Amino acid sequence: MSIRVGDAAEAPSFQKAAFALIDDTQLRENVRHATDVITRKRAQVVAEQHDWQELRSAASAIKAHTLRYLDQYLLQFEAACTAAGGQVHWAADADEANCIILGLIQQYGAKEIIKVKTMTSDEIGLNKALEANGICPHETDLADMIIQLGRDKPSHIVVPALHKNRQQVREIFMRAMGLKELGDRPEDLTNAARRYLRDKFLKVKIGISGANFLIAETGGVCVVESEGNGRMCLTLPDVLITVAGIEKVIPSFRDLGVFLQLLPRSATGERMNPYNSLWTGVHKAEGPQQFHVVLLDNGRTGILADQEARQTLYCIRCGACLNTCPVYRQTGGHAYGSIYAGPIGAILTPQLFDMQHAQSLPYASSLCGACYEVCPVKINIPEVLIHLRGRVVRERQSGASPEAIGMKIMSRVFSSRRSFEAAQRLGWIGQWPFVSEGWIKYLPGMLGSWTAVRDLRPLPRQTFRNWWREREKGNNDA
Amino acid sequence: MPEAICTSRAAIVDRIRAANRSVDAALCSAEYGSIAREYQQSSSMYRATVLAAFEERLREYGACVYRTASAGLPAKIGEVFVAHGQRSVVAADDFPRRWLPEGFRWQTEAGVDTEALNRTEGAVVTCEVAIAHTGTIILKGVRRLTLLPDRLCCVVQENQIVETVPEAIDRMQSFATDALTFISGPSATADIEMTRISGVHGPRVLDVVIVLSQRD
């Protein structure tokens, strides 16, 4: 099996990428402005929702329950969707999902497709796979269009182009759409997108979407959006293909009453986003007459098997943890080297990869807990980060890095009184070249990582153990 | 890329079952039923407050809101279209004829193909349920009609307005498998510098005409 998350396998470590990005003052200004605006709006609409905590608790409980019976709910969804005229496909990994989707497009003889914003398609690298086979995917979400036309990468799971300002967007649009004149007011840019895409909405025969919710009880699918590009792609084409992670299923229609209150307030700070589309299989009167759902695993069952970390799969992709994270707010999303950025990306990406790549991501956090506080489904992200750090360390210990060997020696020294005290004496003798004015300000080799950022007190002449022994002796003498 | 051979269904289901080894499959519905739902699920406000909240939310989204008694509905709809300088309108197939005002060119959706609908000035429809708390209108069907024309006028009966989202979801249970669209204000984006712009791909103008219930 080959699990992929976009291009994350080729990404440099978080720390390395972040160092380069924090020098980009324009990017930091754009990210700070965007996250400030969403955080403020979110705080307002959450404060007015008097039952917010009760909604969070219910959502968290529904998600935990669904994962415990995930096989049943997926099979129930499959049966209901099929009965309503849809076709359900199962994909173990990114390649299989791309293969299924490509096969369907070729079967219908199409050369281009229109897409609703879907993180899952970015996860499996769908656009790349389609382009390699001569099929042209058109992104239709405004931000996704900015990314696609600018040959850029998304930096946020809800507003992927938040790192670009209006002037940068204007340049991208003028070049890609071949426009001689274009204003730089957001209205001008939005109008340009409307004109550019309307023709495609009317002519392209296949639409591809993700899903916010799959409803097991009815076999229905729900997509939440703002611009109407989603409704266009879900309504006008002859064929609709929806690709969704297996964790997107919810048990009942009734549960929408919980999630449709939490998601918009958390994601964009709106009481409700402008459009939600709900459909069940094929509707005779209008809409696509061929409907396919691709259920994607791509590492999710591996996360499910880890009891401490499976809460990662509760995520409804609202992005609230990104906006509030003091680390994300400084670096932006590209430092995470994955389409899933921010705190949720820091736990999701390494797990989807079974910890083979992205080992630096569990450290891309100060563990301040702001992400947990805003999470609408109560994912305890700091807890999962610590759990994953443990896994990273255990994997490294099995290796032969200088750090792993050092730690093994330390562990032997610390496990016997005699060797520990001998080490203390040696340390006290050995430290004298580095002590000046009562502080150690420089240490060589690996220990230098510590003194590079803070000074260290030297080892005292009398250790606690010596002091204790002498005290005992004094007591006995008295 | 290799040929797709679908053995993955069984593999995925097996992996899920292995991860949930300790779970008793028979307890699923009992456990679902015992999930604590302490959030608000019923109305807490006076009807007049619910109506006022619905109007306020819609206006905040940039929608235009009108009230009328049922006898004055055709005139009110006419007024809305005159205000936009609109001469022709496409109505949903089930839109009551008696509500259509005189002096406009009317068509029903059945007679208009997608291309023509794209050039239409505006659409008029009824709704199924509306939510005061979020300023949301819920439509059944009429997906093309309420998407392609640049203006959308929706008639909402006062008794269709509920206070909360869970109440609306509850009312929709009997048609949960229909094609449903939730509309909360005109189409919008904030993708460029978080500035909210109305009307990206859907209608730029949303008019909501509320028909007040008869009071004794």
Image (spheres, coloured by chain):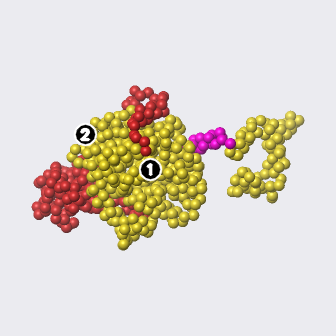
Q: Amino acid at mark 2?
A: Ser
Q: Amino acid at mark 1?
A: Gly
**Left or right position of A225 against B81:** right
Q: Colour of chain A?
A: yellow
| Chain colored red | B
The location of residue A177, given as percent across then percent down, is 36, 65
* Mark 1 neighbour density, 10 Å: few (under 14) some (14–19) many (20 or more): some
Q: Residue A388 colored magenta?
A: yes
Query: Looking at the figure, which quarter contains the C terminus of chain A?
Result: top right
The location of residue A266, given as percent across then percent down, is 42, 51
* Mark 2 neighbour density, 10 Å: few (under 14) some (14–19) many (20 or more): few
What chain does mark 2 sit on? B
Q: Kindly state the secondary structure of the residue where label 2 is placed.
A: helix
State which quadrant residue A293 falls in: top left
Q: Which residues are magenta?
A: A384-400
* Vertical comparison of A49 with B87: above or below: above
What chain does mark 1 sit on? A
Q: Are marks 2 and 1 on the same chain?
A: no
Q: According to the image, label 2 marks what residue?
A: B174
